[in-house]
């Protein structure tokens, strides 16, 4: 039997989309200013993504481009999981 945890899936999302999502959340939910948010992104968030998140892509069994909006990839994965 195949364990669902055996699949390593990397959901790739463009830098600008990640930045915009974070900006909206930081401004709305965390009360940060644009200056604070940009400084944190440039000093911490982006470098940590490059150092720790991006390298994990090479270990993925499946890489989904366009994030969760890639309907073909999502359908393929869902169908594969349903057929286990």
Image (tube, grey):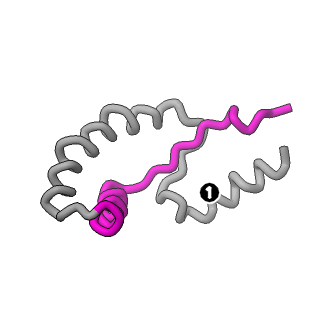
Q: Quadrant of residue 26?
A: bottom left
Asked if residue 8 is among those painted magenta in the image, a careful observer would answer yes
**Residue pictured at 40% horizontal, 32% vertical:** 55
Give the position of the C terminus as an image quadrant. top right
Q: Nearer the viewer, residue 66 or 3?
A: 3
User: Residue drawn at (30%, 37%), measured in percent from left and top?
Assistant: 48
Task: Please report the residue visible at 17 percent of the width from the left and 64 percent of the height from the top.
Answer: 34
Magenta residues, as a range? 1-30
User: In the rendered picture of this protein, how many numbered marks are placed on residues?
Assistant: 1
Q: Is residue 1 left or right of residue 74?
A: right
* Most frequent secondary structure within the magenta stretch: helix
Asked whether 1 or 27 is in front, the reply is 27
Q: Write down the residue under mark 1.
A: 73
Q: Quadrant of residue 38?
A: bottom left
Look at the image and say whether residue 38 sits in the magenta stretch.
no
Q: Would residue 7 be found to the left or right of residue 25 on screen?
A: right
């Amino acid at each position: 039997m195949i364990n669902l945890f055996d699949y390593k899936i990397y959901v790739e999302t463009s830098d600008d989309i990640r930045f915009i999502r974070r900006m909206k959340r930081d401004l709305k939910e965390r009360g940060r200013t644009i200056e604070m948010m940009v400084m944190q992104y440039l000093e911490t968030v982006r470098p940590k993504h490059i150092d720790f998140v991006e390298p994990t892509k090479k270990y993925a069994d499946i890489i989904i481009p366009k994030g969760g909006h890639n309907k073909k990839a999502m359908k393929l994965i869902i169908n594969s999981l349903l057929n286990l």
